[in-house]
Amino acid sequence: MNKPKMAAEKSASRVLMLLSQLERLNEEPKVSDNDAMRQITGKILHLIQTQEKTRNEVASKSSGGMEIILSSLENTPDLQTTLNILAILNELLTVGGGRRTGVFVSKGGTAVLLQLLVSSSKDPPANEELMLHIHSLLVKVGLKDRKFGVKARLNGALNATLNLVKHNLQNYKLLLPCLQVLRVYSSNLVNAVSLGKSGALEIMFEIIGPFSKKSTTLLKYVMCVCFLCMCSSGMNARRAVDTGYLPTLLTIYQDWHRNDTRHRHVVIRKSILGCIKNLTNIKLGRKAFIDANGMRILYNTSTECLSVRTLDPLVNTSSLIMRKCFPKNRLPLPTIKSVFHHPLPHIPAGGPVAQLYNQPPGGKTHSQLNLETDFIIYVCYAPQNDDIETDINKLRPIQMNTRPFDELRAYEYFCREFSKKCIISISKRPEGTADPDLVCSLGSLVLDTGVNGGSVDGPQDEGGEQAVLEVPDTAALLPLHDPDLYLEIVKSTRSVPAYTEVAYPDYFGHVALNLREPILERAYGVQRTKIFQDIERLIHSSDILDKVVYDLDNQSCPVIDNGESLKFNSKFESGNLRKAIQVRKFEYDLILNSDINSNHYHQWFYFEVGNIRPGVRYRFNIINCEKSNSQFNYGMQVLMYSVQDAINGSPHWVRTGSDICYYKNNFSRSSIAAGGQKGKSYFTLTFTVTFQHKDDVCYFAYHYPYTYSMLKMHLQKLSALRTAQIYYRQDDLCETLGGNSCPLLTITAMPGSSSNDHISQFRSRPVMFLSARVHPGETNSSWVMKGTLEYLMSCSPQAQRLRECYIFKIIPMLNPDGVINGNHRCSLSGEDLNRQWQNPNAELHPTIYHAKSLLQYLRATGRTPLVFCDYHGHSRKKNVFMYGCSIKETVWQTNVNTSTCELHEDLGYRTLPKLLSQMAPAFSLSSCSFVVERSKETTARVVVWREIGVQRSYTMESTLCGCDQGKYKGLQIGTSELEEMGAQFCLALLRLRRFTSPLELHNHNSHLLDTENDLIDTRSIPNITSPTTYVLEEDEPAFLEEVDYSAESNDENDPDLEPDLQDNHALPDPNSDSEFSRQDSLN
């Protein structure tokens, strides 16, 4: 029973004895000892091959066996002894290789092998068996030694292996390990550059050949070496292109595609594509690809692969190559500036408008628009957020008045309810005016008198007579909507284009759907299909119509219509569509207008489509979107309003569209429009719609439209709904740049009586300050505000108690001009008003200037608001959530060494978000953040927090898409849910009073929460990963389809300069199907 154990112990002691003998021979080497060394190493080899314990004994650090063997290998001149030792090392590193290889590397084994390789190659021809052993060992060692690439280069081993390959192209037995070692060499990018200069690519292309079932493993390694050499530098890539290897690779790929019918060699095919992809990273390679008919070759091969799901890696890589080589174009516009211009009182030097006006007439220069850029180097880095404010002094509130009180005294007019001289009374309802006659046709809705005093010629039908539209009765369903009143109000709305038409949805009104609209499930491959259809435009250019059917830049030139094309229109309030181009019979490219006095911000759209055919799948492509991602990639649909449905009693905006996706296209942005960044591209939003009715007129919008005229109509109707218990006052805060008024509402409860106690209680109520719609494209914020206003004006007991608790100061639309003129983000000054709060200009930013002044007045009079909340919409996240301000939570996200005891902060800023999470089903507490970022220091939330001293200063963000938690999980958000959110916000304010001490209702400076348990766990604070968005991560999963829609050639580095490269990088596995997927997958 003990015999095997005894035998093992005997063999272990024997190998130690042999190692001892070998060590003595190393110390006193003699020529006569060569025979002895052969015998000893042969015996050690035999013992290692037969006994596992012997292998462990030799490889253990305590035995010193590895040092003795390496010393013998380094010193022996005898070939047979060298072969024996190499065989011993091969046995040791093959079994249990990970740990043993680590011991080998730590003892200097790598350098010994490399020196042996170089010395053995000096006198050709080299011994084949010796070279085979050395390279087999180098493959094993190279994967474990982090400095392998540097050691190989310093020892001169690169050329030794390369020359060995060059002289043994037909010797597949030796060629394979040599190629494996070259692959390991090339994983160091400096080595890859050096190998390219030494002719490695030329040698590799002597091995590459047409389809063959033989030596496929060899070809995998050849392609891997080529891939690494080509991606290492532009110099190698240019050398390969100049030699004509790109057409060769295309031919080889075609051959493998045709013959690999059972798809057993997908890795080889993808490796060939990987090489093509690297060559097309340079301008010369892209030109060679086009000249070699590469677009058509890859398009045809990819089309044949679409039906086989396992071939998706080939399709995705081919798609990436084709899109990269697709010629960069400019948008088909005379200028990227907005079609409309509004003169400003003055233009600040260095501002965005001054920069815009200094552009050349075309809006672009060659240096501003990189249609072709050169070599790309892919760099992986850990995302960091340097945007977080780390200066504690900038985070602390400013304890000083920024303006003299005498300047602020004028704002007493907007706070008359606080004045002792004020006699509280309810203003009378304004007298109604005669309703205008409605004259319309299915093409448009036209006022009988021109807006802004202009005359209007309404569109006529073919008979020359105007049709009278049957208006559905929506008064019972929409108590705040009155079509006739809306038309009357529109007449006083001033727009830059002097709109004379009214959109049907705004006239009819919108009734929220009773049914829920689920988030659209993304069909697999839809993005890839759309991209391939775009590529077809270049391949089959003769099939493209390229017919302009709508153009705001050439309004004087009528569009020639044969009756087959769709008719577009956006010349109405909040409309935005600049140009429509018919690409195919049922496909249209659409271009959005920039914000006025701007050259970018393309996201909001609202336009009309007529002359439609039912039952036909129309594809619409909005081709000048700017954001890098969108909720349209995660189930969001566009909004559509059918006039026929409205006439039939269903006046609804409905979610519609299929095959929706959002991806980068081939239209280049100027550096000015891209914020100084060169080589950036626009994005395409594409969707497909099938219309249901003949002779229908439909409207499409980014989100549920809510116009300025609609707001004025709603306010007028709300005023009529007030009761004797409601104090409601509407003032005009100021006049905008466009000549429109900015309403300011004051809502509270009337005092119980005229007694001093009741009047005193009335005037001592805390102030709640609410605002919305500073960004015109965020229409959901207006629907939330509508819900807030309707609740505040309702007769429910909770609403009455809320009015009795607080005085509400509300600015429901901070940017009327932007809303009216169809802007997405800016006012007529061409600036984002939510970045002007720190130092607003009274002439350029009147609404912000006067809103801030009113807040400063309230602070100066001891009436600092208890809560400030600015309603917004979020385009890239789901749910409703809040951003607040906290010194502690900002510092926690940085490396600033500040003890918690030094940061005295009331934690009450978290109470309102927590209350909302308990009450509002659409609200997500986990999405909230209270970190202050440098880029947000000029926003309303941060400025009101720091300068006005409002601890509970928030931005409330509502999704444009839908919810992924709670009651509405998996559903797209509608106007009823948004209005519900506005009402729930009011209820949360009512509950907030229960957490507020009586002293705080006056001073607003004590702790809100009774216990520490009411706080949100600080561990739930989200990680900061993006410096360009708020501090939260994008909360969406990766796409199922791996199409790199963000790939483009935009690197600005000099391709002749070698990068500062790391010694070791991840090594692609030639046997893996995901060999090159790290550069092909979605970011």
Image (tube, rainbow, N blue to C red):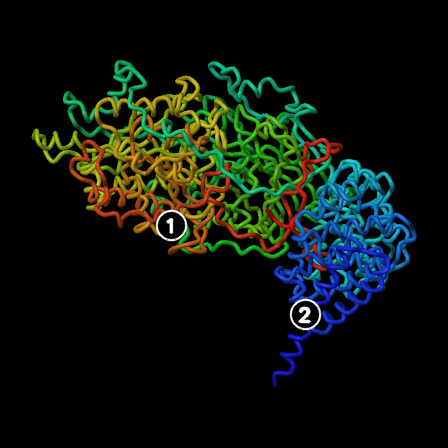
Task: Give the Cα distance between marks 2 and 1.
Answer: 68 Å
Q: Earlier in the sequence, mark 2 or mark 1?
A: 2
Residue extending farthest to the bottom is 1
Number of the front mark, 2 or 1: 2
Front residue of 317 and 369: 317
Q: Residue at x 69, y 36 (%)?
A: 1059
Q: Residue at x 32, y 38 (%)?
A: 900
The amino acid beneath tag 2 is: Thr
Q: Is residue 1083 above or below residue 6?
A: above
Q: Secondary structure at mark 2?
A: helix
Query: Residue 149, position in %: x, y?
Result: 72, 46
Query: Residue 478, position in %: x, y?
Result: 35, 44
For the N terminus, the quadrant is: bottom right
Q: In this rendering, does residue 450 appear at all? A: no
Q: Which mark is residue 399?
A: none
Query: Residue 1067, position in %: x, y?
Result: 69, 51
Front residue of 614 and 832: 832
Q: Residue at x 33, y 40 (%)?
A: 480
699 horizontally vs 801: left or right? right
Front residue of 942 and 10: 10
Q: Residue at x 32, y 22 (%)?
A: 853
Q: Secondary structure at mark 1?
A: loop
116 horizontally vs 613: left or right? right
Q: Is residue 35 above or below residue 277?
A: below
Q: Which mark is residue 54?
A: 2
| Circle 1 residue | 922
Query: Residue 93, position in %: x, y?
Result: 70, 62
Q: Neighbour class for label 2 at 10 Å: few (<14), some, many (≥20)?
A: many
The amino acid beneath tag 1 is: Ala
